[in-house]
Amino acid sequence: MICQDCHQNSATVHLTQVINGHKTEIHVCESCAKEKGYVSEEEEPYSLHNLLSGLFHFDTSAMEKNSSNQTKLNKELTCSKCGLTYKEFTQVGKFGCASCYQTFGDNLNPIFRRVHSGNTTHEGKVPRRIGSDIYQRKKLTDLKRTLQQLITDEAFEEAAKVRDEIKSLERDLNQDGEGEA
Amino acid sequence: MGLEQFINEAISPWLKQDGPDSDIVMSSRIRLARNIEQIPFPIVASQDELEGVLHFVQNHFNHQSFEHYKNLEFVQINELTTTEKQVLVEKHLISPHLANKSNDGAALISKSEQLSIMINEEDHVRMQLYFPGLQLEKALEEAFQIDDWLEEKLDYAFDEHRGYLTSCPTNVGTGMRASVMMHLPALSMTQKMNQMIPAINQLGLVVRGIYGEGSEALGNIFQISNQITLGRSEQDIIENLKSVVQKLIEQERHARAVLMDQSELALEDKVYRSYGVLERSRIIESKETATCLSDVQLGIDLGIITNISKSILNELMVLTQPAFLQQYAGKTLAPQERDVFRASLIRERLTLEQKEEF
């Protein structure tokens, strides 16, 4: 496949860009990708932060049309912990610290949606130690799902074991809750 | 130092092992990005804060072992020479970013070189774990254990809704990049790879060549990795990646069989010509090296060449990179000198094959 930009080199960077549900495929060679800012020159040349800053721009102009007040507000949002402003974030495409996520809050949803195929909420691992509460609750949800599956599969012996596990986990969680209250 | 000893020390021990489907899948990698709560991310943090992270990690993890990851060695980047840094990059133990752009960067590297934990890269902690062949589940399982072990000492920046918080929005959530390095000569030769790439992209995966300076997939070596890190569990991401990789393996095997069936002589000719170039040339560029190595590897995998060890591509792709050549030469080499040195290293390496089972 030949690069769609320079039509000379073979295309080695392949991206699917989704903007407002509209999919565009991009097939370019690495040098054009760098030039156009689809990729960075660092460890992960497919990292999208440069592409992102383009998307942010798009974002702001759309917002300006809707409400200029809103835009003003967003632009002045500043992380109290590291001092990064929302505007700087849209230019750099990187967060300065963990608190930025809180500060910029729901403004980030459209960005995450674009980068992560419509997703805004984490579904994966939870840290074992600091997230033990979340971890337990998640485990409970998973176990309940397993139980349903086992019942559907008529694996009743297994299901009984899982049910007991759920009960004991629920007891633990309740006790913790009461202890805190 | 003799070449044999140099190679023994240069090639990461895990790379010498065979893994599932290792005739096509060169390696599987899991990378997890983590940050420490209360400390700004490396792009914003002050030097004091970064040094704090560095010393904390050094004090708590230097020379520690976890399970079979023995004796983690703490390597501080600014104490290395340019060549030493570059060698670590060529071995994929650290990123170019850590080697060139991080001020207070370090890495904890296990003895087997299977595990490397980068400190103060784009995120405070970036661990990467390699396995030979296609072993994503195993890699994820062990990466999680190592993650839990690190978390006993480190307070991770984590949010119930956003997941692991990272400096770049493209990593948030799982912080995981799973990737598989594949040698796909038959699919490339028959132009099938080009047709398959758009389909793979549709599934949220990125395909790219990993060797070469700009445009092409040198040595027909491709890296397939997940693009999405938020909203899917690590297991789902890996399952998706694995199913695509398995399809590619199937297609590559099929394309190889068709080539053997329909144009065996032409294929043999191509393989032996490349073998001849590697064995005889006096000046060779990295691009030609990669092409020839890919052909020879295909020849080995198809049983056309039987007297060369199976790991030749993996081994010589790494050994013929600029920093490795310079390390072996013991001095800085200009690009033209490198091409001469590269040719002689390859010749010598192939002579070792005839002497004994290497």
Image (tube, rainbow, N blue to C red):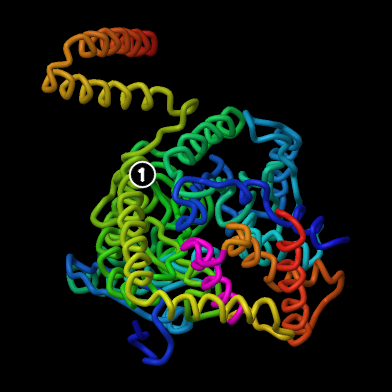
Q: Main secondary structure of the magenta part?
A: helix
Residue B29 appearing in the image: yes
Residue that appears at 51% across and 35% down: B142
Q: Nearer the viewer, residue B179 or B284?
A: B284
Residue B302 part of the magenta-drawn span: yes
Answer whether residue A80 is visible to the viewer in this image. no
As rendered, which of B152 and B265 lies closer to the eye? B265
Q: Quadrant of the N terminus of chain A?
A: bottom left
Query: Which residue appears at 51% of the width and 53% of the height?
Result: B27
Helix or strand or loop: what does disc 1 sit on?
A: loop
Q: Identify which residue is drawn at 51% across, 56% down.
A: B26
Kindly indicate the quadrant of the structure image that contains residue A134: top left
Residue stretch in magenta = B288-305
Mark 1 Cα shell of 10 Å, populated few (<14), some (14-19), many (≥20): many
Query: What is the three-letter code of the residue carrying label 1?
Result: Arg
Q: Is residue B260 magenta?
A: no
The answer to whether B10 is drawn above or below residue A153 in the figure is: below
Q: Name the residue under label 1.
A: B162
Q: Position of residue A51 (x, y in %)?
A: 38, 72
